[in-house]
Structures are given as structure tokens and as C-alpha cells.
Amino acid sequence: MVRGRKIEIVSFLLLQIVVVAMAANVTYDHRALVIDGKRKILISGSIHYPRSTPEMWPDLIQKSKDGGLDVIETYVFWNGHEPHKNKYNFEGRYDLVKFVKLVAKAGLYVHLRIGPYACAEWNYGGFPVWLHFIPGIKFRTDNEPFKAEMQRFTAKIVDLMKQERLYASQGGPIILSQVENEYGNVDSSYGAAGKIYMKWSASMALSLDTGVPWNMCQQGDAPDPIINTCNGFYCDQFTPNSNNKPKMWTENWSGWFLGFGDPTPYRPVEDLAFAVAIFYQRSGTFQNYYMYHGGTNFERTSGGPLISTSYDYDAPIDEYGLVREPKWGHLRDLHKAIKLCEDALLATDPTVTSLGSNLVASEYKTSSGSCAAFLANIGTESDATVTFNGNSYHLPAWSISILPDSKNVAFNTAKINAATESTTFARQALKPNADSSEELGSQWSYIKEPIGISKADAFVKPGLLEQINTTADESDYLWYSLRMDIKGDETFLDEGSKAVLHVQSIGQVVYAFINGKLAGSGNGKQKISLDIPINLVTGKNTIDLLSVTVGLANYGAFFDLIGAGITGPVTLKSAKSGSSIDLSSQQWTYQVGLKGEDTDLGSGDSSEWVSKSPLPTMQPLIWYKTTFDAPSGSDPVAIDFTGTGKGIAWVNGQSIGRYWPTSIARNDGCTDSCNYRGSYSANKCLKNCGKPSQTLYHVPRSWIKPSGNTLVLLEEMGGDPTKISFATKQTGSSLCLTVSQSHPAPVDSWASDSKILNRTSPVLSLKCPVSTHVITSINFASFGTPTGTCGSFSHGRCNSPRSLSIVRKACVGSRSCKVEVSTRVFGDPCRSLAKSLAVEASCS
């Protein structure tokens, strides 16, 4: 036993020696984060682990690494991990330890943004709603109850990471942690108490002794040694609050989030690449894409209010886990070009030279002879030709060229070498064997949710109650019910005469039922005002108002106090006499949630399901259930909810989130194309105006069995579930790319020591994204002056007649091909003109 104990001790000591040997020392200086004594240029991307599934994580992480990332950044979501006080959840999509370990396994670092306030368009900003009910609590200020809870949870996460030895100081991947989040945007609203709280937050974080630096984003007065960092569409003008801190960008918004009722925002990759390049040109050394993969707001996690279930964000990896081209590929090439400059960037500060109006050169030169330069045209109108170090360079408007040797261009932000890959949703019937609408309906069962009060825990209160204080966000739904007795001699209303019910709510959806029948509805972000013509009868009448939240507020000073629900007034006005009655202070009966939620109908297991024809449709508040087999293949799966109204859906008991295909985007603000030149804003580039904000809802493949799956809908508005269908997302059936003679040679033609291997001409490269596919046809090819975009290319006045045959010979039958863009290959059809090669190919 003694000998065995000695072996155990020796083994333990050896393990500790290995861990110490692997541990990294992470510090910083004025130029960069310093890991084991070496400054690092770091490129990061946000992936929020609960917005995808554990089965998706390895592929997402690998695609991030392949795209040139060094770091994965994520928030920690307090309300997901502690939905009820002291009852923790670190399983499934909330298995934070597993996610961090998978990042480490891929050889990447982690930036852990503990907060624990997240914002993130996440319900209640990531705070658990139970915090709101702690006596005397005030969020995000010098308030002892709040600080005690914040410190307890932050320490919980830090201790968990330490137990798993996940900090870099222990040999793990976490090189940076964040406390609080964008507090500097709102701290003035909290006055002196806000400043005290901010300093306390910093001190509390440092006391947890993680062995790695902490940062605060958007906090210009973050106390030493906390690093203050920048968030925004551009951060090149940002300066840290100390000459001893590096210039870091924790959120570069790669697109923008979608809201129900809004058109879809997107950000051109030429502008995103410009923002990144100019940040590194101006001495930045850490940049993070928010988001690199946006994912999905499953369950009731979306915030806002009115944030959509999709959190795609126009990110380089889309909601379904597929790379978005050319955004992903163009940024990958950018990252390679920046890394070619790393030694020079980190060794010195730049020499900045004006090359003309809106034209700037920044050159980094070291005493050892290494150098790199960035040439920027920050003008939005005109291309320019500049002279730098005796050489001439063409700079498109709003673009930056990167010269890893201060001579040859490796990359220009406006010149894309990555092909556009088509993506399509292939529709498949949910019930492919149903021959008629009647047979289709017979394959569904239903349960009608009672209108109004149906649960034993209903209660009566005078006046109108604010919703969040009443439901504690345990449900989206709150019933307000009032009974009225209209006497035969009522002077206010004659029997059968019309009245107008006026209802005011502070969000987000209201349904009004009179005597069990839907009379009207409305929705709005912060204010709903309804005037509904109704009929009352002599005798007993019931007014049932169903108030529905669509995510709680997540941003702004005192956002936690933003309410919801029917706060009044609620009045009845006689259509005949014009007189009115204020019902607001009456004795209202309240019910939190729906009966079907209490009986867990979302699981599909109830014995109450009704299976008889005809299936009731286009009626409010019906639960529907059916079974289905998985769509064939391995492509990502969505459900197209066109034909339904609004509700929540479950697949095999897993909530895929709120659906609302009848929420239509406004008609104005969209354009056929978006000019990338000039500063980007969230409303600059919009699409899908006048169309449903979201019809397709992601169902992770790992949630679906080959057969015998259960789909449950809670249809609150009224719709026809037999109209819904599957849609599998397919990519890469067609490839398009235009490369000009002025494009740089491929960045891969450079060696890692910033030496160009061969001074090649520009090259057009195509590769089918599916490994089993090959290029089967070339649908268009023109070397000359082609016009148009993918799917609508046409020949210009100048065209080499050999274009199609040359490209076909190089590409057809292969998964990938490269074609040199030069007159040597195609001849010179128009000697006086600049020429491009445009190609559209098909893969299968």
C-alpha cells in the first residue's frame, strides 16, 4: 500500500510538472497581448455556444480555424446557467467546459466574456429574471444585493474554469476574460454610484486571480490593469486609456441582428475587410468579429424585444453552420495577409505618410530589415493611383492594399479572390405520402387551449398588473380576464349595440377575446393601442385579454425596469352615446401561462390529443402535433412555417424557438445592391422589404431521428399547420467569380516569411464546396469587359473568343481549378482596356 501510495504521489507530481510546462504566461504591453514573452497579432471570432448545439461545435470551430482565426470569443449566459437561484445548468448547449475544451483541442485560444451582463440580443441581457425579485436590488450600480449576486456567479464561472484547468496560466486556452459589458455607454445614467460600481467590478474581477488579463469593453475609464477595448463597426480611431495598454477591438459587427417586423440587414465584405485592415494599419493588434457564427435563438432566449429566432448576423459562418461566400473566403485571405506582416507590425510603430487627399501610407520598418506597409484610400468616390517607395499602385475607393514586404501587394480589401457560392433551400413535404389536403389534415392531431382562465392557480387583483412582475418570465403569456354583467335596462349600452374596446399595452402582442371569440389583436415594441369594435350581450360578458411577450429588453440604462403587458387604460366606449367606462381599476382575474404549458404539451406525450377530421385551422390558440421522418441527406434542416401565424414549436421536445412568419418587414429602405464604399450603419444595406422577416426556422440535425419524430406547434394567432414544409439548405451548386488584371496574385503565393514565392499574375480559383462534387459545366466565361453579377453575367464590348473553351478545359471534371488572368493565356482582345475574367460554373 505504501509503495502504491508513493507511485500515486510521483504520478501526481509528474502531472503537475507537465501542466506547469504547458502553462502560458499572458501579459500585455502598449502594442499587444504578450504570450510567453512574445507579442501576438490575434484574430478572433464570436461563437455563442447556446446558439448552436454540441454536435455543431467541432465543425464551427474548425471552420473558424480554417478561416484564419486564433481566438474564439463567447459570452457566458447567466440565465442559461442559473435559471433558478442555486440551480445550475451546464449540460447540452450550456456545457461551457466542453465548448472551451473543444476550442483548445483545435489549437485556438478563448476570450471568455463572463460579464455577467451580456446584452447580445439575449433575453433580459443574460440576467436571470429571479434577480429582479431580490429585495432592495438595483442592477449594475453600487448596490450590495446586486454586487453580491454578480460576484457569486462570476466566481462560480472562474472557479469552474480553474477546476478544469482552462486558464492559460494553468495550461488551458483562456487568454483573456471580460467583466461587465459596454457599461461605459450607459454609466452616466447611474451617476456617482455607477462609477463606484465600475471600479468595484474591476477590483472584484482582479481578486479572482485568473492569471490572465481582464478587459472592459466600451469603458474609457477602466482602471489599471484592466484593458479598455472598443466595440463598433469601425475602431481604427480608438485609443486605449493608457500608453501601456494595447489597442483591442472586442466587437467588430460583421452584420447586424434581425428583428421581427424588420428587413434583413447585411454588411458587404469589402467594407468589413476595409474596417479590419485599417484597424491593423493603425496599430491594432486584437480584433474580434461579432459574430463569426451567429446561430439560432432557440427556446425563449431571444431578447430585444422582438428579436427574431434567427441570429444569423450575416456572419462568415451562417446560422446553419455553412460558410458564407465570398465573405468567409475574402476574410481568410485578409487574415493571411495580415499575418504575413506580423513581425513588422509588432516590432515597431508605423511611419505614416500622406499620399494625397484621403490617401495614407503606413509603413512598419524594423532595425533587422523586415517591413510591411498598408496603403489606404479612405475616399468614397474615386479610385486613385499613388506612388509609394518609387512604385505605382492602384487603390480603389474605400480600400486598403497590404504589402507584406513594403513593395508587392498581397491583398486589397475591395478585390475579392473568393468565389460566390450559391445557397438554396430545397423544399420537401412534411408529409410526402399525403395525396390530398384532407388526408394531410388527418395526419395531425390537436388540443384546443382554453380561452381565458382555466387553471387553478389563477388569482384576482384590482387594477392592471405589469406582466414581468407577474409572470417572472416563466411564460410568454399572461391572461387578463374581466366579467361584466350587462343589465337589460343598461343606459350605457342597449342590447346588441356596438361598443369600442380600447386597450393600451407596453408590448409586445395583445389578443382580445369577447365571450370566447377573438375580436382583435395588435403588436408593437413598446406601445400598442387598440380600438376594437365589439358586441356585448345582455347578461354576462367576458373580456379576456391575452398579453404576449416576445423577448425581454436587453440593452440600455435601467433596461431591467422596462416592463411589458397591458398597463392601460382599458376602456369601453358606447358607439351609440359616446360615453365610456374605464375598466382599468376593476377586479381582474389573472392567469400566468397557458394550460398546455403546465401539462407539457410541447413534449407531445399527452393522452389528450384529438385525432379526428376535419382538423381545425385558422383559429387562435390551438396546439398541433404530427410525426415526421427526417429529410433525406445530411444538409442542414429548416422548417418553413409559411401558412401559420405565430407561436412556438418543438421537435422531439426541444424548443426550436418562436415562429412568426406573418410578421412583415416594412416596405422602405431596401435596395437592389449596396455600395460598400463609405461608412456602414445598421440600416445602410437591407433586403427583403415587404416580406416576412423570417419564414425558415433551424432544426439541428442532431435533434432529428431517422424516423418517428414529433413536431408540436402552439399556434396562438391562427394558421394552417398542414401548409408547413421542410427546407434543406444546400450550397455550392453554382460558383461565380470575377477577377481583374489589377487583382493581387493569390495570397497563398507568399511564403510565411513575407517573401513572394513567384510573381504570378492574378488567378481565378474555383472549388466545389462539397468534397464529392466536381465542376460539371461552365455556364459563362468572358475575358475582357464582362458586366453583371452572378446569375446575370453578360459579354461586354470586349471579349476573348477563347474564354469559354479555356476555362472549360481547365475546370470541367475537377473539384477545383485555377486559371491565370492574363493576356498570355487568353490573348488580348482590346489592348487599350483593363480586362477581367468572369466565370459562372456549376457543381454536382
Image (cartoon, rainbow, N blue to C red):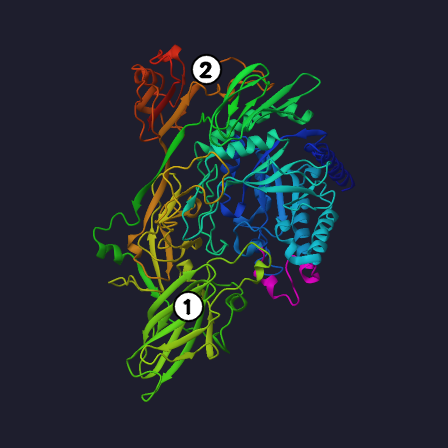
Circle 1 or circle 2, nearest the eye: 2
Residue 554 picture quarter:
bottom right
Q: Is residue 142 magenta?
A: yes
Q: Element at badge 1? A: strand
**Residue carrying label 1:** 546
In the rendered image, the residue lying farthest to the bottom is 489
**Where does residue 190 sit, x and y in percent of width and height?**
66, 58
Q: Is residue 189 magenta?
A: no
Give the residue drawn at x 61%, y 38%. Answer: 249
Closer to the chain start, of discs 1 and 2, is: 1
Give the residue drawn at x 55%, y 29%. Answer: 358
Amino acid type of the residue that numbered disc 1 sits on in the rendered structure = Leu
Q: Element at badge 2? A: loop
Res. 428 visible in picture: yes
Range of the magenta residues? 127-148
**Where does residue 228 sit, x and y in percent of width and height?**
67, 42
Res. 778 visible in picture: no
The residues tagged by marks 1 and 2 sit, at their Cα atoms, a distance apart of 66 Å
Pick the front one: 638 or 752: 752
**Residue carrying label 2:** 761
Amino acid type of the residue that numbered disc 2 sits on in the rendered structure = Ser
Please state, as top left, top right, bottom left or bottom right, where the C terminus lies in the image. Answer: top left
Give the residue drawn at x 44%, y 70%. Answer: 479
Q: Which mark is residue 152?
A: none
**Where does residue 570 sit, x and y in percent of width and height?**
43, 73
Taking the image as shown, residue 803 lies to the left or right of residue 302, namely: left
